[in-house]
Structure formats: C-alpha cells, structure tokens
Amino acid sequence: MKAKVMFLCSGNSARSQMAEGWLRHLASDRFEVVSAGTEPSTVNPLAIAVMRERGIDISGHHSKSVGTFLGAAFGYLITVCDNAREKCPIFPGAVKRIHWPLEDPAAAMGTEEERLAVFRCIRDEIEARVRGWLQEQEPVA
C-alpha cells in the first residue's frame, strides 16, 4: 500500500503543484500524491513551463481546495508556505507534518524572463527537497 502525501500551499498554483509533479515523477511507485490550496486559484502557466523544461508535464493539473480532502487520511502533509502552515486543517490519522518555507514564485515581478528565472530557482529547490525527503524515506539496512 502506497503512503499518501499532500503538498499544501495557499493558491495551489505553483509550489505545491511543482512538488506534486516532482514526487509523482520520482516515486509514483511508492507514494500516492496530491496537492491542494487553502485558497485555490489556477495552475500558473510559468510553473507548467519550467516543469516542462525538466520533462515533467503538469499541464493537466488543476488547483484544488484542501477542503476537498477533509476526512481523507494522509501519511504526510507537507506545507510549502507559511500561510498554508497556519491555516491547515487537522487531518485524521498519523499524519507527519513537514514544513518547507518556499518563496512564492508567482509573486515575482519583472519581465517574463526574470519571472521564469524565479520559477526555475523554486523548481530546483523543490526538486532538491523532494529528493532529500525521498532519501530519508529509504528503509535503513
């Protein structure tokens, strides 16, 4: 049985979507993964673009409310912004809560290329965090 993981941020438009994409790409055989937002909006096109650069397609993702998952049991709840950490509802079961305070790339200003650079930076930070977290989940021999 796969462990269930939820990535949560405020808008479910960039950080949590990218994290969901990374974990699904790297370990969908071991984890069932979803993402949600405390105030869902739409998936940011720049998040889709920078993930596509790494061969991960999140264009079919849509923004979901955390309320959609109330009553569901998750093994891990990973908040990727302080706002989501503060507003996160209680989930039943033995949820392990983890917090990754990540800058919101959607707040970046400037030209499209400057904003893409911020999205790439956050994408790469999320990849490193997901890979590091996966190493911690490996069984100890």
Image (tube, rainbow, N blue to C red):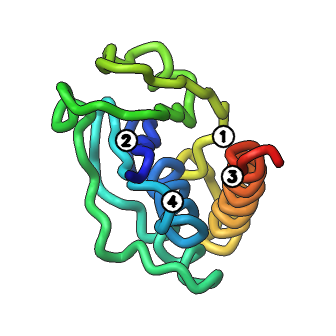
Q: Amino acid at mark 2?
A: Gly
Describe the element under mark 2 as helix, strand or loop.
loop
Label 4 vs 2, first from the N-terminus = 2
Report the number of numbered marks. 4
**Which of pointers 3 and 4 indicates the residue nearer the eye?**
4
The residue sitting at the front extreme is 141
Instruction: Give the CA separation, mark 3 to mark 4.
Output: 10 Å
The reply to whether discs 1 and 2 touch (Cβ–Cβ < 8 Å) is no
Q: Is residue 33 left or right of residue 102?
A: left
* Residue holding disc 4: 30
* Residue holding disc 3: 134
* Residue holding disc 1: 103
* Residue holding disc 2: 11
Q: Position of residue 128 (x, y in %)?
A: 77, 56
Instruction: Give the CA separation, mark 1 to mark 2.
Output: 13 Å
**Which of pointers 2 and 3 indicates the residue nearer the eye?**
3
Q: Which mark is residue 94?
A: none
Image quadrant assignment for residue 118: bottom right
Instruction: Give the CA separation, mark 2 to mark 3.
Output: 25 Å
Q: Amino acid at mark 4?
A: Arg
Q: Position of residue 104 (x, y in %)?
A: 58, 43
Instruction: Give the CA separation, mark 1 to mark 4.
Output: 28 Å
**Position above or below: 79 against 56:** above
